[in-house]
């Protein structure tokens, strides 16, 4: 029996998981990544003299799909689980909001506001399905449940910080999914939500993951930027030929009679290659660009997704800023969305005793912030930190580096799932599966692995349900209890 020759495009966690599962099922898999290494948004980089994640990453105890992959990589037993604290920077004050008592003391709200705010979170955590919320604007839903004051003082600044003015187009399913993720551990029977990290960070995870891909026969090709995908008929005129499907209807392109048997991939500065099928995992605008032969409706759906990008600074500091893993910011003069102090979670010994801080700013892909130089960003971010933390001084900064990504996540806009592009495209053998297909969830590695494993079982290898993934079966109600869980 000949093996199906599959190309996966995009070497992020989604592409890596798809490649692994298909190879475990006996397919011949090639994984193409445009960048110089795999990992995508979860990759690691050099900050001063340390190597750590380019974007802050934690794993939750309830991230069962991802933890099963970590177990397969023989890394799960090394995970460190830590209880962290959350802060709020509101009206120029830094306040802890890490437990119920602190919440009840939270200064900017009256008791009734707090009760309604707490009630909103509790109610959202109990809802099982976000579909119904997709038609309700997030602002109307939160204002109705929490009241005007809690909405204006807490929710609106948080929505603006995370979504910019795009909050106006976002549905209530967004906030529901965010709250559901934070409550997932409790749903699965675990008492506390703890954050986990692996000593060595994602650099170590990705190294093990790539080794496992090689061991399963996956051909990993970095520095391969896909430029075009087109149907290809190996039998036309005795030699292979690209098929122009512009004049062929969807139905007829799918029909065997057209003779389209393979898919041709063209890369920048590389020879073209053919495969039995290809799975594209890149952001939707890239899929639309590299597949000009898709139907008008498919292009409309792909380009209709509203993406959020990020400008995220990493700072290595001589001393800590505060005790909070996340500090949410509701004051709009602060030029970043939140402060993530990684070393409240990760042992500072990983960084030679120094503190690692991320300052993210979520923005639209066309935001002018993408054009601002590192020096300008550094000046404005450090000026804000000085105002927020009186003990902080510029001389504390040992290293500063900025990551810019224009397409991070597709926003859950109104009636989102009705307008999603199909995973199986109109082009024979061409699949387009990316993080936009995470419906009813937030963007995270666990959901990404689940998406890949579900796609393999339900779409790519439906006849082999359970194959290669039997030990990775989603078990929402059964927490993965491993040796070092406290
Ligand atoms: C700031 C930030 C914080 C996060 N925090 C967490 C967290 O705490 N916990 C958590 O679980 N998750 C977190 N995430 C989410 C997590 O990183 C993502 O869910 C996951 O990495 C998405 O993987 P992906 O493969 O879908 O996409 P990507 O990682 O975007 O992979 C897509 C890949 O496609 C490649 N590509 C693009 N165009 C082409 C082309 N033409 N040819 C070939 N290759 C191409 C890209 O280079 C990229 O490597 C965070 C993300 C960000 C940005």
Image: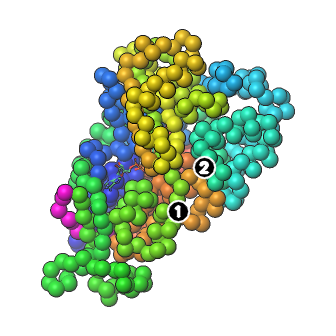
| Magenta segment | 269-277
Looking at this view, name the residue that lies furthest to the left. Answer: 238
Query: What residue is disc 2 on?
Result: 166
Q: Secondary structure at mark 1?
A: helix
| Location of residue 475 in the rendering, given as x and y in whole percent from the top left corner | 54, 50
| The disc label shown at residue 106, or none | none
Q: Give SS at disc 2.
A: helix
Q: Which residue does the image show at 15% across and 80% down from the upper left? A: 239
Distance between the Cα atoms at labels 2 and 1? 14 Å
Q: Is residue 38 left or right of residue 126?
A: left
Please state if 20 lies on the left or on the right of 85 as rendered: left
Task: Mark 2: give few (<14), some (14-19) or many (20+) Cα within 10 Å.
Answer: some
Of 19 and 187, which appears nearest the observer? 19
Q: For residue 356, what is the image quadrant?
A: top left
Q: Which residue is mark 1?
A: 304
Q: Is residue 166 magenta?
A: no
**Mark 1 closeness class: few <14, some 14–19, many ≥20 residues within 10 Å:** some
- Main structural element of the magenta stretch: helix, strand or loop? strand
Quadrant of residue 75 within the rendered picture? top left
Q: Is residue 401 above or below residue 62?
A: above
Q: Position of residue 21 (x, y in %)?
A: 35, 56
């Amino acid at each position: 029996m000949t093996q199906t020759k599959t190309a996966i495009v995009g070497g992020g966690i989604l592409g890596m998981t798809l490649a692994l599962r298909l190879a475990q099922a006996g397919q011949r898999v090639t994984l193409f990544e445009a960048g110089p290494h795999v990992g995508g948004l979860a990759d690691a980089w050099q900050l001063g003299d340390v190597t750590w994640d380019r974007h802050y990453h934690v794993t939750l105890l309830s991230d069962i799909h991802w933890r099963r992959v970590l177990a397969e990589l023989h890394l799960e037993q090394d995970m460190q689980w830590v209880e962290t604290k959350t802060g709020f920077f509101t009206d120029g004050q830094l306040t802890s909001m890490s437990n119920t008592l602190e919440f009840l003391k939270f200064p900017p709200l009256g008791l009734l506001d707090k009760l309604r705010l707490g009630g909103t979170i509790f109610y959202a955590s109990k809802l099982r399905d976000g579909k119904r919320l997709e038609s309700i604007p997030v602002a109307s839903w939160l204002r109705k449940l929490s009241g005007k004051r809690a909405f204006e003082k807490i929710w609106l600044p948080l929505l603006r910080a995370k979504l910019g003015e795009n909050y106006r187009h976002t549905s209530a399913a967004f906030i529901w999914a965010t709250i559901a993720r934070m409550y997932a551990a409790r749903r699965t029977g675990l008492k506390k939500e703890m954050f986990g990290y692996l000593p060595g960070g994602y650099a170590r995870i990705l190294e093990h993951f790539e080794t496992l891909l090689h061991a399963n026969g996956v051909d990993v090709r970095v520095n391969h930027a896909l430029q075009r995908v087109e149907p290809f008929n190996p039998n036309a005129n005795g030699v292979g030929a690209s098929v122009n499907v512009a004049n062929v209807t969807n139905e007829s392109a799918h029909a065997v009679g057209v003779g389209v048997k393979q898919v041709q991939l063209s890369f920048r500065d590389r020879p073209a290659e053919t495969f039995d099928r290809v799975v594209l995992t890149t952001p939707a605008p890239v899929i639309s660009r590299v597949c000009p032969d898709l139907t008008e409706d498919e292009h409309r759906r792909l380009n209709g997704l509203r993406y959020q990008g990020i400008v995220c600074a990493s700072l290595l500091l001589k001393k800590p800023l505060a005790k909070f893993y996340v500090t949410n910011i509701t004051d709009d003069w602060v030029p970043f969305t939140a402060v993530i102090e990684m070393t409240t979670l990760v042992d500072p010994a990983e960084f030679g005793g120094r503190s690692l801080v991320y300052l993210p700013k979520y923005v639209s892909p066309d935001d002018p912030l993408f054009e601002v130089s590192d020096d300008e960003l550094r000046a404005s971010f450090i000026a804000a930190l000085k105002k927020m933390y009186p003990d902080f001084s510029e001389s504390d900064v040992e290293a500063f580096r900025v990551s810019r990504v224009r397409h991070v996540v597709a926003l859950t806009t109104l009636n989102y799932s009705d307008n999603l592009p199909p995973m199986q495209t109109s082009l024979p053998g061409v699949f387009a599966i990316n993080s936009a297909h995470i419906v009813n969830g937030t963007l995270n590695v666990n959901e990404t692995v689940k998406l890949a494993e579900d796609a393999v079982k339900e779409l790519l290898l439906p006849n082999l349900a359970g194959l290669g993934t039997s030990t990775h079966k989603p078990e929402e109600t059964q927490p993965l209890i491993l040796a070092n869980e406290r």
